[in-house]
Image (cartoon, rainbow, N blue to C red):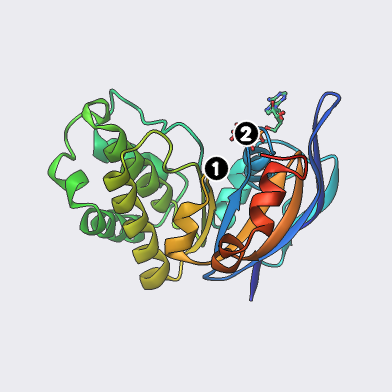
Amino acid sequence: MTLLAVQDVTVRYGRLTALRNASFTIGQGETIFVTGPNGAGKSTLLKAIAGVVTPVGGDIRFGDRSIAGSVPEDIARLGFSMVPEGRHVFATLTIEENLRLGAGMRADKAAVAADLAHCYQIFPMLRDRKESPAGILSGGQQQMLVIARALMAGPRLIAIDEPSLGLAPKIIDQVYEVLLQLRDERGLTLLIVEQSSTRALLTGGRMLLMRSGEIVMEGDARELLRGDALKQAYFGYGGH
Ligand code: ATP
């Protein structure tokens, strides 16, 4: 079943077209990597889906609803959770307060309590420090916290912008282990932006390559990474 359909979406910042006629779909439970060089439009694509920026053209459907032009709160309520780049935690609030903020708009207290318990099961490190201010956590732990906080909204799809950025390889392994556990155990759909494509080789899934605001290649991540076409498309045909 198609969960998200992006159709011909264009985003402009003033005179700059940051995203041009982007189209792709994601099925329920699928994993998609969006990769590409700096400034390719990857974050803009996520922001357009999340409602943080408004497309000037095209349509975005989530489930059976058109969400293009909707406000972020409404899109989140439908089951789209985004973890923006930069691991923004509320440093002076406790870890548990940070997590509860993620569930802010959910009225069902019993379900929230169950999700909190489940988060602590997946991230025991957060449970052990739940009364401590989030500011004491290391970079990798903060990445876990923002992912856990996004899960507290009860999403069907979680979109994460550059989860590996600035983390040591061992910590990146742990972050991905958790993401794949969530995909496999809860059927969570993953949309992951990474400038480096090597992770996709390990985790599999589909890959979109972006350059200069356009999706220039799409296919099975492992197949694309094995061939030369991805490298050529990544660096352009003018050389490396
Ligand atoms: P990075 O990996 O560096 O985050 P990206 O692929 O995510 O890159 P975007 O952040 O989506 O790319 O940026 C796409 C283009 O839009 C770039 O040229 C960028 O400078 C520009 N841009 C991004 N945000 C804004 C903004 N708020 N106002 C103006 N231009 C912007």
Q: Residue furthest front?
A: 239
Q: For the point 34% across and 47% down, which residue is it?
A: 172
Left or right, 55 with respect to 199, comes to: right
Query: Which element type, helix, strand or loop, lies under badge 1?
Result: loop
Q: Where the C terminus falls, by quadrant?
A: top right
On screen, 112 above or below 46?
below
Residue linked to disc 1: 195
Assess whether mark 2 and mark 1 are in contact (beta carbons under 8 angstroms).
yes
Left or right, 71 with respect to 183, comes to: right
* Res 163 → quadrant: top left
On screen, 113 above or below 135?
below
Q: Nearer the viewer, residue 67 or 167?
A: 167
Q: Position of residue 145 (x, y in %)?
A: 32, 42
Q: For the point 57% across and 60% down, which residue is it?
A: 225
Does the Cβ of the disc 1 residue fall within 8 Å of ligand 1? yes
**Crowd tier of the residue under label 2, counting other residues whose Cα lies within 10 Å: few below 14, some 14–19, many 20 or above:** few
Number of numbered callouts drawn: 2
Question: What's the distance in space between the residues labelled 1 and 2, CA to CA?
Answer: 7 Å
On screen, 151 above or below 45?
below
Q: Where the N terminus falls, by quadrant?
A: bottom right
Q: Position of residue 86 (x, y in %)?
A: 45, 31
